[in-house]
Amino acid sequence: MHVMRTTYSRPAQVGFTLIEIMVVVVILGILAAAIGPRLFDNVGKAQIGRVKTDLRTIEQALDLYRLDNFSYPTAEQGLQALVERPNDPNLTNWGPTGYLPRMPLDPWNRPYEYLNPGQRGEIDVYSLGEDGRPGGEGAAADIGNWDL
């Protein structure tokens, strides 16, 4: 009788070493550092583009309001006069459904500002930018109908 001897070998280890994982993490970090700022710059450009589109829409609604009522809404009536009829007996031709279905908010979820009379034109419609304060630079700069 012949006895077979079997030897057991250790199975090959499957997985990654700590060094390999660290190399991958470093590579991902370098890629994020290189690509991240470009992506965020595009987000800022998209937000400014949205503000300008909203301002054009609001300005067109204000022009229609003026055609119907011979003047822009007062500063006290504000932009809400484009959505809800102001309590003003002199308004005889206010649009039956309003001039806008709703007043949009800027990309930073704040209402657009309105001045009548304006400081840069007959009327000013603007967003205070990302920081929500007057002035600023870059994404924090005011964006108004004077920029259109």
Image (cartoon, helix red, strand yellow):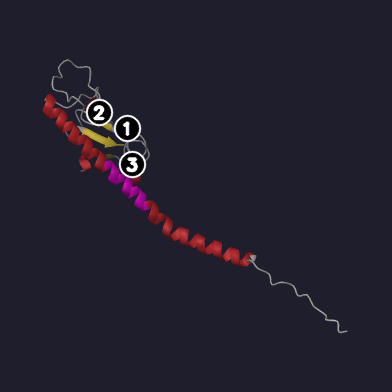
Which residue is painted at 35% across and 48% down in the image? Answer: 44
> Disc number at residue 140?
none
Mark 1 highlights which residue?
Answer: 111
Residue 7 percent across, percent down from the top left: 79, 77
Query: Where's the N terminus, which quadrant?
Result: bottom right
Which residue is painted at 25% across and 24% down in the image? Answer: 84
Judge by depth and name the residue closer to the eye, 102 or 143: 102
Q: Earlier in the sequence, mark 2 or mark 3?
A: 2
Q: Nearer the viewer, mark 3 or mark 1?
A: 1
Pointers 3 and 1 in contact (C-beta within 8 Å):
no
Q: Hey, which residue is sitting farthest top in the picture?
A: 89
Q: Is residue 2 visible?
A: yes
**Does dot 3 land on a helix, a strand or a loop?**
loop
Task: Quote the CA–CA distance across marks 3 and 1.
Answer: 18 Å
Q: Is residue 117 left or right of residue 47?
A: left
Kind of residue sitting beneath label 2 = Leu
Q: Is residue 122 visible?
A: no
Badge 2 density bin: few <14, some 14–19, many ≥20, Cα 10 Å: many
Kind of residue sitting beneath label 3 = Gly
Which residue is painted at 35% across and 42% down in the image? Answer: 140
Q: How many marks?
A: 3
> Disc number at residue 79?
2
Mark 3 highlights which residue?
Answer: 136
Residue 88 percent across, percent down from the top left: 19, 17
Which region is colored magenta? 41-51
